[in-house]
Image: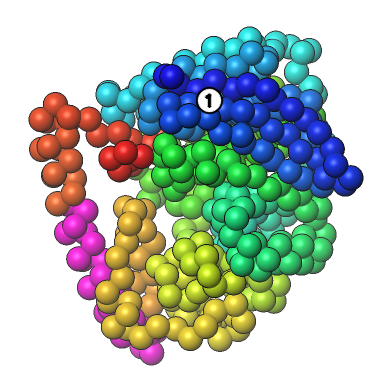
Amino acid sequence: MDGFRICDITVARTGAEHRVSARVEHPAGSDTVWYESAEPFGLQPADAFVTLAVACALSTGGPVVCREPVSHRLAEGLWRIGRLNQASDADSPEIVIDAPRRLGAENPAPGPIRAALFTAGVDSYHTAMDPSLRIDALFSVLGGDITVGNRVQAESLLPRWRRAADELGKRLIVVRTNARELIDRFARWESIYTLGLAAAGHLFQGRIGVLYSSASLAWRDMSWPPQDPVVIPLLSSESLWLGFHGAEHSRQAKIRAVAGVPLVQQTLQVCIDDPRTPGNCSRCEKCVRTMLGLLAEGRLGDFSTFGPLPEPSYVRALRFHMDRELAFMRELESALRVRPDCRPWADALRHAVRRCEGRTFSRRWRRWLFGERAGGRTRRSPYGGALPPGA
């Protein structure tokens, strides 16, 4: 079949666990997608499954069909995200949502809870600790960056989330889901993770009224038009507003702001690459750049969540997989070069950045020559990045 059809939405409760599920039929067959939480869900679960289906349809096309009513504002926002996708690539498919719309009083009133998406990483700690946001709850999704089947990482993450909520005086809302398994069939998680996490947030309409997402890039490093600040509010409904926070600060500024907090020093979690290692592997690109950022602030020795810092030769050989990582590394090189004892790592970073800049330039030319110019199709995420063949 073409597109995505959402069927058999079911809400159930077993003991203290609440569960909502649906069968999603798609071009590769069908999957049963489920969400579980100790917190009760709202009354409009269709919005979550439609958002999830659109995240997949951005790369494959076809209509998203649901017989349950969905938020009119959300449906319009998802359609506009599809138009943004087409603006960056004219060959991208149009997003069509075939579902009845809820209007006015048919939607639940916004709930009283103000929450922030939380992973225990640098960005999410920076948002969670901002007093101006008046956040009541930390909202964590197990099955997003860390897949729900990754028990080694999950058993390491959950205690950190609970401790962070307790010490910050926030409520912790944890959702477990297998939605990543569906997303991975059709797209790269790194390209559409905002939609995947927003889908879980929509399950709590009527209870959560505001949900903040942390910026991973500073304004100065975003391409124009800056996609995150545009896309995230478009994921709002009449009952749930999604906010965007932190783009006025660079990654190094965020590290500087949170590095002196004992809670962060003992619970910071950034690694998502090694399913065999609990906590941070201290070897992947994300771990290494965070460790170097802490080194530049003279704080790495205060953190118990990392192993030994890799040698400069290891940093020199790093490969970056996304253009935004280059922005992080350029800023990090400048911060390291200020400290004489950090200059070997600054030199290693400069070498790695120059090599990756050359590869990025070559990739863009190949994309133009053999994709767009030759009449082929370069599929892109809502954030403008090209999706790999078959994604």
Residue 339 x/y as whole percent? 39, 84
- Extreme residue in the front direction: 29
| Horizontal arrangement in the rendering, residue 234 relative to residue 329 (left or right) | right
Q: Can residue 179 be seen at all in this image of the molecule?
A: yes
Q: Is residue 101 above or below residue 371?
A: above
Color scheme of the displayed model: rainbow
Q: Is residue 262 above or below residue 175?
A: below
Magenta segment boundaries in residue numbering: 338-361
Q: Secondary structure at mark 1?
A: strand
Q: Give, as a three-letter code, the residue at label 1.
A: Glu
Q: Can residue 76 be seen at all in this image of the molecule?
A: no
- Extreme residue in the bottom direction: 341
* Residue 180, quarter of picture: top right
Q: Nearer the viewer, residue 3 or 310?
A: 3
Residue at x 63%, y 21% (from the top left corner): 7
Residue at x 17%, y 59% (from the top left corner): 358
Residue at x 42%, y 19% (from the top left corner): 2
Q: Nearer the viewer, residue 238 or 335?
A: 238
Residue 144 x/y as whole percent? 57, 49
Residue at x 71%, y 47% (from the top left corner): 175
Residue 240 x/y as whole percent? 70, 30
Decide whether the magenta segment is chiefly helix, strand or loop.
helix
* Residue 107, quarter of picture: top right
Number of marks in the rendered image: 1
| Horizontal arrangement in the rendering, residue 363 relative to residue 95 (left or right) | left
Residue 340 in the magenta stretch? The answer is yes
Specify few, some or many for label 1: CA neighbours under 10 Å numbering under 14, 14-19, or 20 or more: many
Q: Quadrant of the N terminus?
A: top left
Q: Which residue is mark 1?
A: 25
Residue 297 x/y as whole percent? 50, 78
Q: Is residue 298 above or below residue 49?
A: below
